[in-house]
Image (cartoon, grey):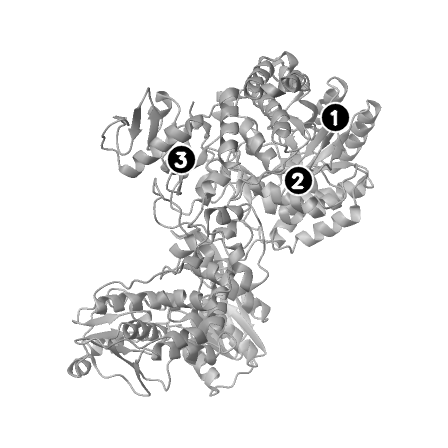
């Protein structure tokens, strides 16, 4: 495919709208239709039923974008900017992809990619459609919405024939060909409304927002605005750039909020409009507008130019938006409001979204337009929730802005979780799988879990209060619900699609809730299975991996014995991890669950050798020992290994005092540092060669260490400990390695931190003496294979991987049990664990922070039932949901509507690009030839041209063919039920 998109003819557009609405109650995939309540706000001599709408950008470029936004509750439309450069000339300057909105937003597009006449036609088409749809479908007052033009970027271009014709056509569309065409189509579709359609107001827009490029001189901005006010008689907003704050202010705000990696210099700040020039200019323009009986205001703000330094997008410069722009924009609002004593009207963009829209509106800031938030999953549907939030508030004409409220918003944004950047870089939300053409819905949380827990299902059971069935389902794959409900690394949560909305579903906490509430019922239900003959399992190591393996084997009726050298089971969690992280009582419950299946436990002595165990009749032996051996920290001084030191402290054998330095940046280092701090150390310093951003510890564990008062010495390498201090070399970050982590390089400068004892929390290892004594071969990393070279002997958990997470150990334990049993374990999932498609669809577009663990199931998006992230996030609606006869939903990419912005790629849970990798519907043979996508082109009659792998082939749907059956069903459904997509 190419980035070429083209407008849909109005007749086809309206056929799509009325057919989809009649069939499903949706329009362009927007499911929640907003029906106005009768309230409205006056602006530009018109009225708007809500203060929200899409900002000039990807969500206001095509007629279908505007209609979709209206359906969800938008009533103020800042249509995409037009300028003298347009069409193919401009499109050639826009790289692909050009949008990145998976966190804070970035883009490299600016004005419409259509020709200016095409853009005008799109806006007039949308205007006419909404005039009729609002009335016919009862969405609201046909006069309850406003179109606001956006023009740029210089006066010469604006006065030129192309843009001038556009402005005049938008002011009065009566003489345009498209206006007549739209009315004719609408009368054909709604003949009973012919008189009303004839009377549609041709005044599409009475207002304009001035958009200028960075570096535009102030006198040019004033000339443009004055021209639009005096010559074009338009209500006028002037869009301001965040650079008006000054370089030092912008750098200080962003650095303090964790955006220090965003790179920009001061040249835009020097070249853009300065505060000293802006204030008197705005005063003059306000007076000019007042003299003409027109409204004037400021649009805050434009996107913020920053350097492309991490390969985010193709070009060298990109434009920042979204949550990182909000603190800059709201501070601009604060200064403007204060300077003009609340009398200057402010139209807001710059990071507006659900969590701040009510505060903005209450402060007198409106209209409020959005872009980044509706480019994320939920898409246009997010507007509905914003409208719902603000609708109970008082709607009144603009009477000024509340400077104090805006000041408080600005200050609060610097610590607001919705705007502050997490300490660590965001992990990838994607799997390593390719998206299939058919049946692509999957739960990324499950894919991110090493044991593929049935997460959406047990979340739903907990949501219904069915804790015993939930725990039963959890323990089908996970025999350590208390351990994993407390200290699991929860990679599932990093994959959770809810992260694109607000914050992850609290999966781990919900698992613990199920364990706590369902435990007694589960224990009472367990029946010891009949003993299997001919197999006998020995497990060396009674930590999490060993307990899990014993559970799985015991559940299968296999005689199983655990050999543990310590006095009790539990491994590192029991003997090392501090009790403030996990209590012994919780570990005991997991152990009791395993023992319920008749597993024999032998503690307090080393295990027999492999040969001895075989002589005792054990057919399968698992080495599940933990990583107890400290890594080597080659410095002089008083140094202790973290594992043994923490074990001694937990057992009460080691007193903690003085100053302690912990070397390392993983979870073990965080545990050691927190334990030292809580156990009486005067000062605890965590020393790491890189910055905290690159520490391997989980974000949550790092944050807990900071809360406990652990001090961080970043970019520091220990050299020696002596005389109560640790000498460290200052490091600098060099080039990034393949994983993106920047390698530390010594600077030759040194400093000291108070230190009486060094705790080494680096590179814990499994003692290879056990392996050597039993003839186990190791690889170059010193690790055995899962199925070792010794017959009947396996390795799992730390013994196989090196330091591993609990859940990775469970995955290995399950693999061992399957090898012993000879087949995979199967089980049933209760019907109550599933949700309907309509229930899952209802959650789309709704933002909701975590409040109560028992209600987390309400926040679960049930992605395996309905994903549709690519559908939601496409501003042009080029990814479409197809409802099949069997009730399943499939996704088809509509080639003609896609400009390859790349936004859908960021949100697909697969390692794929839906715009390239989903089955595609082509409009013309030329489009198909210009693409490499798999897809279909409908020909005459029952003939189709289909590309699967290789060159396209023609098929006849009326008889037998060699198309894959599921693909043929999809193609036939497109033909029979979704002809409006291509006719």
- 343 left or right, relative to 816: right
In what element is the residue under mark 2? helix
- Depicted 912 relative to depicted 744: above or below: above
Left or right for 6, reference 532: right
In this rendering, does residue 213 appear at all? yes
As helix, strand or loop, the secondary structure at mark 3 comes to: strand
The residue that label 1 is drawn on is: 235
Task: Tell me the SS state at disc 1.
Answer: strand
Which of the two marks, 1 or 3, is nearer to us in this view? 3
Residue placed under numbered mark 3 in the picture = 892
**Residue 933 in sight:** no
Q: Where residue 811 appears, x then y in whole percent?
A: 33, 65
Which quadrant holds the C terminus? top left
Which callout, 2 or 1, points at the residue further toward the start of the chain?
1
Lower position in the chain sequence, tag 1 or tag 3:
1
Spatial CA span between label 2 and label 3: 39 Å
Q: Position of residue 931 (x, y in %)?
A: 35, 28
Q: Residue furthest front?
A: 192
Q: Is residue 429 left or right of residue 211?
A: left
Q: Specify the quadrant of the image occupied by residue 56.
A: top right
Residue in the image at 40% along x and 24% along y: 923
* Of 77 and 475, the residue lying toward us: 475
Q: Nearer the viewer, residue 276 or 285?
A: 285
Closer to the eye: label 2 or 1: 1
Read off the residue under disc 2. 242
Residue 290: percent from left, percent from top: 83, 26
The answer to which quarter of the image holds residue 229 is: top right
Q: Nearer the viewer, mark 2 or mark 3?
A: 3
Q: Which residue appears at 30% of the width and 87% of the height? A: 605
The answer to whether the residue labelled 2 contacts the one labelled 3, judged by CB atoms less than 8 Å apart, is no
Q: Quadrant of the N terminus?
A: top left
């Amino acid at each position: 495919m190419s980035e070429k998109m083209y407008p849909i003819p109005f007749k086809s557009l309206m056929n799509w709208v009325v057919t989809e609405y009649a069939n499903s109650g949706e329009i362009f995939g927007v499911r929640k239709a907003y029906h106005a309540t009768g309230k409205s706000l006056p602006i530009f001599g018109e009225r708007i039923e809500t203060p929200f709408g899409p900002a000039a950008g990807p969500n206001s470029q095509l007629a279908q974008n505007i209609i979709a936004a209206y359906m969800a509750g938008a009533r103020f439309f800042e249509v995409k900017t037009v300028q003298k450069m347009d069409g193919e000339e401009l499109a050639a300057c826009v790289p692909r992809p050009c949008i990145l909105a998976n966190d804070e937003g970035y883009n490299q597009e600016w004005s419409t990619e259509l020709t200016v006449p095409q853009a005008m036609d799109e806006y007039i088409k949308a205007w006419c459609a909404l005039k009729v749809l609002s009335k016919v479908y009862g969405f609201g007052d046909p006069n309850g919405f406003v179109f606001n033009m956006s023009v740029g970027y210089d006066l010469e271009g604006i006065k030129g024939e192309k843009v001038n014709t556009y402005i005049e056509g938008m002011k009065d569309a009566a003489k345009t060909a498209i206006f007549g065409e739209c009315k004719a189509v609408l009368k054909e579709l709604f003949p009973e409304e012919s008189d009303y359609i004839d009377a549609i107001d041709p005044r599409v827009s009475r207002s304009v927002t001035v958009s200028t490029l960075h570096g535009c001189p102030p006198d040019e901005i004033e000339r443009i605005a004055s021209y639009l006010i005096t010559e074009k008689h338009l209500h006028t907003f002037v869009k301001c750039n965040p650079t008006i704050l000054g370089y030092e202010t912008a750098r200080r705000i962003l650095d303090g909020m964790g955006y220090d990696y965003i790179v920009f210099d001061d040249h835009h700040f020097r070249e853009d409009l300065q505060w000293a020039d802006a204030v008197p200019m705005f005063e003059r323009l306000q007076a000019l507008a007042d003299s003409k009986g027109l409204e004037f205001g400021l649009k805050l703000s434009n996107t913020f130019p920053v350097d492309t330094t991490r390969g985010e997008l193709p070009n060298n410069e990109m434009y920042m938006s979204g949550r990182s722009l909000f603190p800059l924009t709201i501070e601009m609002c604060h200064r403007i409001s204060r300077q003009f004593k609340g009398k200057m009207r402010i139209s807001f963009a710059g990071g507006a979204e659900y969590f701040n829209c009510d505060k903005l509106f209450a402060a007198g800031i409106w209209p409020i337009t959005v872009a980044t938030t509706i480019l994320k999953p939920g898409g246009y549907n997010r507007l509905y929730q914003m409208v719902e939030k603000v609708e109970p508030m008082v709607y009144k004409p603009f009477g000024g802005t509340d400077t104090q409220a805006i000041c408080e918003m600005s200050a609060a944004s610097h610590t607001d979780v919705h705007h502050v950047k997490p300490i660590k870089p965001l992990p990838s939300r994607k799997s390593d799988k390719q998206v299939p053409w058919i049946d692509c819905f999957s739960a990324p949380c499950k894919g991110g879990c090493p044991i593929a827990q049935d997460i959406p299902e047990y979340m739903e059971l907990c949501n219904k209060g069915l804790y015993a069935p939930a725990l039963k389902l959890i323990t089908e794959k996970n025999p350590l619900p208390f351990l994993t409900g407390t200290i699991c690394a929860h990679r599932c949560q990093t994959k959770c699609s809810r992260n694109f909305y607000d914050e992850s579903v609290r999966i781990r906490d919900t698992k613990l809730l199920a364990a706590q509430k369902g435990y007694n019922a589960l224990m009472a239900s367990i029946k010891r299975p009949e003993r299997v003959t001919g197999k006998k399992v020995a497990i060396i190591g009674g930590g999490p991996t060993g307990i899990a393996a014993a559970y799985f084997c015991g559940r299968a009726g296999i005689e199983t014995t655990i050999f543990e050298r310590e006095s009790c089971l539990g491994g590192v969690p029991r003997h090392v991890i501090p009790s403030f992280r996990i209590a012994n009582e919780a570990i005991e419950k997991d152990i009791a669950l395993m023992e319920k299946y008749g597993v024999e436990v032998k503690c307090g002595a080393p295990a027999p050798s492999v040969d001895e165990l075989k002589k005792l009749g054990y057919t399968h032996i698992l080495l599940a020992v933990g990583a107890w051996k400290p890594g080597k920290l080659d410095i002089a001084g008083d140094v202790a290994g973290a594992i043994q030191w923490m074990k001694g402290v937990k057992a009460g054998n080691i007193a903690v005092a003085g100053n302690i330095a912990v070397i390392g940046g993983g979870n073990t280092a965080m545990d050691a540092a927190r334990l030292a701090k809580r156990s009486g150390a005067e000062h605890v310093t965590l020393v790491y060669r890189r910055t905290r951003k690159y520490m391997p510890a989980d974000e949550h564990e790092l944050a807990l260490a900071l809360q406990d008062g652990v001090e961080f010495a970043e970019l520091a390498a220990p050299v020696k400990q002596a005389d109560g201090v640790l000498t460290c070399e200052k490091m600098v970050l060099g080039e990034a390695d393949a994983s993106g982590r920047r390698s530390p390089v010594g600077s030759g400068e040194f400093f000291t931190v108070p230190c009486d004892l060094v705790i080494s929390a680096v590179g814990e290892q499994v003692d290879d003496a056990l392996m050597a004594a039993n003839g186990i071969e190791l690889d170059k990393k010193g690790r055995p294979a899962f199925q070792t070279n010794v017959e009947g002997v396996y390795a799992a958990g730390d013994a196989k991987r090196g330091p591993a997470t609990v859940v990775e150990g469970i995955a290995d334990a399950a693999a061992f049990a399957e090898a012993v049993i000879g087949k995979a374990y199967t089980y049933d999932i209760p019907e109550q664990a599933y949700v309907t498609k309509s229930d899952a669809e209802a959650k789309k577009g709704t933002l909701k922070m975590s409040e109560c663990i028992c209600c987390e199931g309400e926040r679960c998006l049930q992605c395996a039932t309905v994903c549709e992230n690519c559908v939601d996030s496409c501003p042009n609606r080029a990814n479409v949901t197809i409802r099949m006869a069997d009730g399943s939903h499939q996704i088809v990419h509509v080639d003609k509507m896609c400009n390859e912005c790349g936004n859908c790629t960021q949100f697909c849970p697969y390692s794929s690009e839906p715009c390239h990798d989903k089955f595609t519907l082509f409009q013309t043979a030329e489009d198909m030839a210009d693409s490499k996508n798999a897809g279909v082109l409908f020909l005459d009659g029952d003939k189709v041209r289909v590309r699967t792998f290789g060159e396209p082939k023609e098929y006849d749907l009326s008889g037998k063919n060699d198309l894959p059956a599921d693909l043929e069903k999809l193609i036939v459904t497109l033909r029979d039920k979704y002809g409006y997509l291509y006719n």
